[in-house]
Image (spheres, helix red, strand yellow):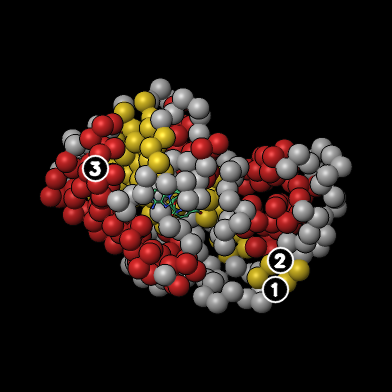
Amino acid sequence: MKILVTGGAGFIGSHVVDALVASGHAVSVLDDLSTGSRGNLPPHVPLHVADVADADAVAEIFGRQRPDAVCHQAAQMSVSRSVREPAFDARVNCLGTINVLTAAAATGCRRVVFASSGGVLYGEVTTPAPEDTPADPVSPYGITKWVGERYLGFFAREHGLTTVALRYSNVYGPRQNPHGEAGVVAIFLNRWLAGQPATINGDGRYVRDYVHVADVARANVLALTAGADVVAPGTLTAFNVGTGIGVDVVMLEQRLRAAFEGLPHRAAAPRPVPTPLHGPPRAGDLRSNLVDPGRAGRILGWRPTVDLDAGLAETAAWFADRAGA
Ligand SMILES: NC(=O)c1ccc[n+]([C@@H]2O[C@H](COP(=O)([O-])OP(=O)(O)OC[C@H]3O[C@@H](n4cnc5c(N)ncnc54)[C@H](O)[C@@H]3O)[C@@H](O)[C@H]2O)c1
């Protein structure tokens, strides 16, 4: 299949590209490189540098590429920026999604898979939330994910597209940006590689569901390629992509620390790492958020396969290698 990945130069998108290339698909990428990088992509994969909010550019790229399916990962994904600049957030996340859906419908692209978020849709939940949990997004970023799903439903009904929303939990793994506000695994590793302690917000008893990016990439491949008997034309299907297993930040720091300290010792990464500091709690942080991946298992045949400790060790090794440590 010919598949276009928006945001394909980013953390999750580039792993989706790798998984699609490995499965023999013809992949191209649309990305404005605002947070992504060319270096995340295999050299042979065509990259169209464009803004998803630019309707003409998106239409032109779809017209040239004529993809069979699109995997829409491109987004402004900072919750705090969405609070500060809701119009910018809506421009990228709402208009961008409308532009991708419009161009898909106009050029015969039959399927759109959308990166949504269980975290921002379900809010505070202490048991794994199934997909029919009422959505109650509180930030502009969360609102745009909810609205994005509504637009998918509209384009599915109006144009017969097959649309799938993958509601990720907290994704971690190689290539995650350590300078963002999310991605605690990347942030902690980056601190340790600089010889500094990790800072845990508040008491750290904030429970999250950590899913490895390779599992997320596989969920995207399944959603992009499953037959019409699995995801039907003219419909929107939402799937949670997470493990349903909650781990709080204090425990995560300990397990990541064990993985990091277990790496072969090279001089540039001081070990043992300093004990963590506790900073003030972050306003609005949920105490608990986790998703139930049962539907993806039953319908797509997707299950998370990467054990957390193995995934943390692999991620720690990747960050250490990249830092030359
Ligand atoms: N990382 C997570 O835990 C998580 C959780 C839930 C949902 N998501 C969603 O998954 C998707 C990918 O997130 P990620 O973690 O890989 O982030 P990322 O920042 O690494 O990737 C986003 C990519 O989109 C590109 N992009 C941003 N704005 C663009 C624009 N206007 N036009 C074209 N390209 C643009 C960036 O350059 C980048 O390559 C996003 O839609 C995000 O909202 C991520």
Residue drawn at x 45%, y 72% is 84
Side of 86 where 56 appears, left or right = left
Q: CA distance from mark 2 to mark 1?
A: 6 Å
Residue drawn at x 49%, y 69% is 80
Q: Amino acid at mark 2?
A: Thr
Mark 2 Cα-neighbour bin, 10 Å: few <14, some 14–19, many ≥20: some
Q: Residue 147: name its quadrant.
A: bottom left
Side of 12 where 258 appears, left or right = right
Whether label 2 touches label 1, CB < 8 Å? yes
Residue where numbered disc 1 is placed: 279
Query: Mark 2 or mark 1: which comes first in sequence?
Result: 2
**Residue 34 spot, x, y in % from top left:** 47, 51
Camera-near label (2 vs 3) is 3
**Residue 300 spot, x, y in % from top left:** 36, 39
Query: Mark 2 or mark 3: which comes first in sequence?
Result: 3
Residue where numbered disc 2 is placed: 199
Q: Amino acid at mark 1?
A: Gly
Residue where numbered disc 3 is placed: 59
Quadrant (top left, top right, bottom left, bottom right) of the C terminus: top right
